Image (cartoon, rainbow, N blue to C red):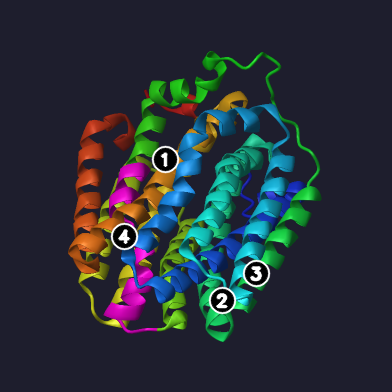
Amino acid sequence: MHASRSGDRFAAFRHVSYARFFFARFLGAFATQILSVSVGWQMYDETKSAFYLGMIGLVQFLPALLLILVTGSVVDRYNRRAIVAICMIVSALCAGAMLVITAFDAFEPILVFIILTIFGIERAFNSPAVQSLAPNLVPAEDLSNAVAWNSSSWQTASIIGPVAGGLLYGFSPVLAYTVSFVFFLGAALLVFMVKKPAQRTSSKAVTWNTILAGFRFIFGEKVVLGAISLDLFAVLLGGAIALMPVFASDVLTLGPWGLGLLRSAPGVGAIIVAVTLASFPIRHNAGVFMFIGVALFGVATVMFGLSQTAWISILALMLMGAADMASVYVRETLIALWTPDEVRGRVNAVNMVFIGASNELGEFRAGTMAHLVGPVPAVVIGGLGTLAVAILWSIGFPQLRRIDSLDAPNSQDHK
C-alpha cells in the first residue's frame, strides 16, 4: 500500500478503530459481492432477460438519487458510526429476504426489485457515511495510507467475493444468501466495536443553504468536479458488469462458477496495480496518470466485448480492473484530502450518487442497450464512449490534468 508520510505502510492500522472499520468494510463488501453475483445469476436464470439485469442496477440507483438532499445532511449531523452499523443490519435483512424467497421457491422479479430497492436505500446512507467515517479514524498524515487500504479492501473483496458467490450459488443458492446474511451481521458487530470518533457537526438549523453545501463545494472546486464527473461518465458508458451473466451463459458458455471468475478478474488486476503502487508510489503527473487509466479502461472494455474466448475475456477484465484502480486511487485521494470535514458527508453523498449513476445506472444503460442491439455491441459502444470521455475531460479540465503530486491542496496550485 501507499505509505503514509511517516513511511509506515501499515500506519492506518496503528489506530485500533480504523482496523475494526477496515475489516467491517471488507466483510460488508464481501457480502455485497456474494449477494450481487447470486441475484444476477438467479435473475437471468429465471427470466433470460438482459433488460431485467439492467433493472437490478436502476432500482439500486434511484434511492440514492431521490435521497441525495437527505443522506449527506444526515451523515454530517449524526453519528456516522451508528449510521454505518444500522445500514449493515438492513443489508443483512435484505440478504435474509433473498434467502427466504429462494428457500421457499417464491422467486418473483417484482419481489427481488422491492428487496433491492430497500438495499439501495441502505446504500444511499451507507456509502457517504463509510466514505466520511474513515477520515475521522486516522490523523491527516495517515489519510492517504487509509485511502489506499480502503481501496484494496474493496478490491480484495471484489476478487474473492464473486468467486465465492459463484461457487456457493453453484452448490446451493440458499447457502450463498446465508453466507451473505452472516457476513453483513459480522460487519455490523465490528462497526459497533469502533469507538465513536471525533466529528465536526453543525448545530445550525437545516436550511436549503446547508443542504446544498456539498453541491456548492463540488461545483466551486474544479478539480473535485472534474474528478467526480470523469468517474460518472466513464463508468456509465463503459460498465459491463450487469451483462456478465449474459456473457457467462450465452457468449462464453460458462456456469455460475465461470461468472464468479469473470466478476473477480477486475479485482485481480486492481490488486496487481495496488501492490505496484506500494513499491512505486505516484510522485509526479498524478492527473495524467488518472486520465491514462480511464482511457485504458475504455480500451479493455472494447476488448472484452469483442472476445469470444474465456481467457481473453478474463485478461481484458483484469486490464479493466487495473486501469480503474489506477484512476480511482487518484480520484479518491484528491476528494478525501481536499474536502472539509464539516461538509464531507454532503460532498460524499453527491459523490456516491455520481458513482451510483456510473455503476447502477450504467448497468441499466448496458442492460437496456443489450436488449435492443445485443450484448456485444452494447459493451463495445460503451467502451468507445469511455475512451472519448477520457480525451474530452483531459481537454475540458486542464486543472485536473496538471495535478502533479497527491498532496494537500495548499501544497500545489490546483485552481
Query: Can you say whether 27 is above or below 143 in the image?
Result: below
Mark 3 neighbour class, 10 Å CA radius: few under 14, some 14 to 19, many 20 or more: some
Determine whether the residue tagged by mark 1 lies in a helix, strand or loop.
Answer: helix
Mark 2 falls on what kind of element? helix
User: Residue visible at 78% across and 56% down?
Assistant: 189
Q: What percent of the width, then of the height, locates residue 330?
A: 43, 45
Label 3 vs label 4: CA separation?
A: 27 Å
Q: Is residue 85 above or below residue 393?
A: below
Q: Closest to the observer: 77 or 136? A: 77
Residue at the spot of label 2: 164
Q: Amino acid at mark 4?
A: Gly
Going from the N terminus, do you reach mark 2 or mark 4 first?
2
Is residue 59 visible from the viewing direction of this image? yes
Density class for disc 2 (Cα within 10 Å; few <14, some 14-19, many ≥20) is many
Q: Which residue is mark 3?
A: 100
Front residue of 338 and 88: 88
Labels 3 and 4: the sequence-earlier one: 3
Q: Which secondary structure is most common in the magenta stretch? A: helix
Q: Classify the position of the C terminus by image quarter.
A: top left
Instruction: Please report whichever mark, 4 or 1, sits nearer to the chain's N-terminal start.
Output: 1
Residue 142 % position (x, y): 63, 42
Numbered mark located on residue 354 in the image: 1
Q: Secondary structure at mark 4?
A: helix
Residue at 46% in and 23% down:
217
Give the number of the mark in front: 3 or 2. 3
Q: Is residue 408 left or right of residue 137?
A: left
Residue 178 sits in quarter: bottom right
Q: Which residues are magenta?
A: 231-254
Q: Which residue is mark 4?
A: 367
Q: Give 292 or 261, whichever is nearer the viewer.
A: 261
Q: Residue at position x 72%, y 41% from top?
A: 81
